[in-house]
Amino acid sequence: MEFIYYFGDVFSPVSFALLLVGTIGGLILGATPGLSPTMAVALLIPFTFQLEAAQGLILLGAAYTSTVAGGAVSAILLKIPGAPANIATTLDGHTMAKKGDGAKALQLSFLSSAVGGVFGVLLLIFLTPLLAKWALAFGPSHLFWLAILGVTVIGSLDSSSVVKGLLSGCIGLWLATIGFDDIMGAQRFIFHPSLGGGINIIAALIGLFAIPQVLTMFAKGRQASGAEVIEVKKHSVLDATKEMLRWPRALTIGTITGSIIGLIPGVGGQIAGLVAYDQTRKFSKHREKFGTGHPEGVIAAEAANNAMVGPSLVPLLTLSIPGSPTAAVLLGGLLIHGIFPGSDLFDNHPDVAWTFINSMLIGQILMCVFGLYVAGMAARVAQVPQSIMAAVVLVLSVFGAYSVQSSMGDVYVMACLGVMMYFLERFGFSAAPLVLGLILGPIAEANFIQGSMIANATDGMGVYFLGGTLNLFLIAVVVASIAYSVWMEVRVQKLVARGEAKS
Amino acid sequence: MSRFQHIIPSGLIFAVGCWIAFVSFTQQPAEAFLFPRLIASVFVVLSGWTFGKALLGKSRVGVGINRHMILNLTPGLFIAGIYVFWAAKFFGFYTASTAAFFILFSLYDPSPHSEVKTWVRRAITTAVFMLVMYGLFSLLLKVYTPREILF
C-alpha cells in the first residue's frame, strides 16, 4: 500500500497542471488521425527535459492514457480510428453516431475507458512491486535473455512477416552498437561524424515514429480530409452511466481481456480492442446487433484498449523490458533523467515510480471528465488538413531532435532514420521491433559482456547462458513466440492460397 | 508489387548485413566486437533469407511503392531534405522552419492556389505556428537554436 503515501505529490500545483495539459492535449492529439499515441509521446519527450523526473513522466503518462481514449472521438464521429487501438470502436460507435446517438457513444466510450483504465492501473499498482522484488533474482544471463525476449516477441508478434520482424529487431540491435564501446573505448561503425556519440535514443524515437507519418501524409498528395464530423446532440451523462452498467458482461470482458493482453509484451491495444469486441459478441444475447450501433461493442472495445495501458507498463517498470513501442518511448523518458527501471526504481526512486503510477490513476478519471467536454473540439481538430499536420510534425520533429543535446547531428540522424523507416515499412518491416532493439541493445550487450566474464571465470559460456531453469524458461519463451508466429504466418498463407485457388 | 521492388530493399539490407559482419569479424579489439559479431551472424542469416525469398519471387509482405506515390512524395521530401540538411543551419532554425512550413503547407494544401484568401490563410497559419514554436522552445525550454544569416 506504499502508493497511497505518494498521492499528495500528484496534486502539487505543477504536477497537477502537467497532468491536465497531458490529458487534454492527449485527447486532442489522439483524436487526430495519423498521430499515434507513440508518436505523440515521442514528440513530447523534449518538453520534459526541464522538468523533474516525476513531473516529466506525469506528462508522458497522461498523454499516453488520453491519446488512446481520444482516438475514439474520430472513430465515432468521423469513422477514422485515431489510433489502431480504436479500430473496434468504429464498428458500432460510428453507426451509433449516424443514428443520432453520437453523444451517447462518446460518453459510453469515455466511461468504459475510465473503468477499464482504472482496473488496468490497479493491476499495475499491485503487480509491479511483487515482480520488481522477483527481478532481483535475475543475473546477467537472465537479463540478456530478457532483452532478447523483448525484441523477439515484439518482432515476431507485431510484424506481418516473422523474418522481417526479427530482422527489424536486428537492425535496432546493430544501431545500438554504433559509437564508442563502453569497455574498450573502441570505435564501432562510426561512418559519419554525427554518429560519434552513438545514436541518441530520443532523436531516433522521434525520427522512427514521426517522420514516416509525415512522409505518408506527403505521399497522399493534395488531398482534402474528406471526413465529415457528425453533429452530436446533448445526452445526459447519468443516463450514459446507467446504460454502461446495463451491460456488465461487455464491461467485464473488455476490462479483463485488455488487462491480460496488456501484460503480454508486443501485443498492442489494437488486438485488445478487437479480441474484446469478438469475445463480447460471442457471449452476448444480442450478438446479431453487433455492427449495427450496439452499445456493448463500444463498451467492450474501449474498456479493453484502455485497460491494457497500465499492464503494458508492468514489464517496463519491473524488468526494464518495454512491452510496447509506447512503453519503449517512456523508457527513453526515464533514462534521460538517469533513472533505470526495475528494482532500482522502487528502492531508490519510490517517489518517482509511485507519483507516476498514481498520476495515471487520476489521469483516467480526468480523461473521462474532460473527454466528455473536449470531444466536440477534438473532432474539429481531427479535420485539420494533412498539409498542416505534416508541416507541423516535421518542424516539431526537427526542433525536438535538436533540443535533446543541441546537436545538428541528432537532427540528421533523426531524419535519416525516419526516411529509412518509411521505406522499410513499405516493404513489410516494422518500427516497433527496431525501436525495442535500439533501446534493449545496450542492456543486452552490457549483460552479455558481464555474463561472459563470469562464464569465463566459472563454468564456461554454454553452461552459464544456456543452463539453469530461468535461462531455459526464457529461451523456451523466445522459441515458442517465434514458432507460434511462424505457424500463424504459414496458416494465413495457406488460407490466402486456398482463397486465390477458389476465385 | 513486382519482384524487382522486393529485391532492391532486401538486397540493400543483405549488403548492410554483410558489411556489419565483415567489420565485426575483422576489426580489433575483438572484445569490443563480441556482441556485434553475435548480432551480425543473425543479421546475415535473416537478411540472406529475405533476399533469397525476394530473388525467388516469394516475398509478399508490404505494399511497395508506386509511381503516383513517388510523384506526390518527391517534392515534399526534397524540400524537407533541404530544410533539415542545409537551410536550418544556414539561415537559422526559425527562418528556415518558417519557409519550410509555408512551402510544404502551400504545396500539399488542397485549397486553390489562385485565391488570395488561401494565401493569406496559409501565411497567418505559418506565423501563428512559428510564434507557438518560438514560445515553446526559446522562451519555455530555452533551447538555443543555430542562428546564422537572418536571426
Image (cartoon, rainbow, N blue to C red):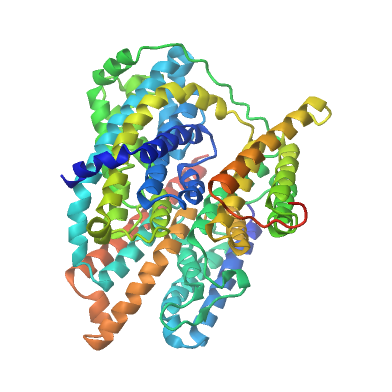
- A391 in relation to A441, above or below: above
In the picture provided, is B150 more to the left or to the right than A103?
A: right
Count how many numbered circles sit on residues in the image: 0
Residue at the outermost right position: B114
Tell me the quarter of the picture where residue A365 sits: top left
Residue A93 % position (x, y): 42, 23
Q: Can residue A376 be seen in this view?
A: yes
The quadrant of the image that shows the N terminus of chain A is top left
Q: Can residue A78 be seen in this view?
A: no
- A64 in relation to B142, above or below: above
Please tell me which residue lies in front, A240 or A18: A18
Please tell me which residue lies in front, B131 or B31: B131
- A181 in relation to B7, above or below: below
In the picture provided, is A70 more to the left or to the right than A407?
A: left
Residue A183 % position (x, y): 41, 81
Residue at image position (70%, 43%) is B101
Residue at image position (29%, 16%) is A243
- A453 in relation to A222, above or below: below
Please tell me which residue lies in front, A393 or A162: A393
In the picture provided, is A204 more to the left or to the right than A365?
A: right
Residue A367 % position (x, y): 37, 30
In the picture provided, is A253 more to the left or to the right than B133?
A: left
Residue A94 % position (x, y): 46, 22
Residue at image position (65%, 60%) is B4
Residue at the outermost left position: A1
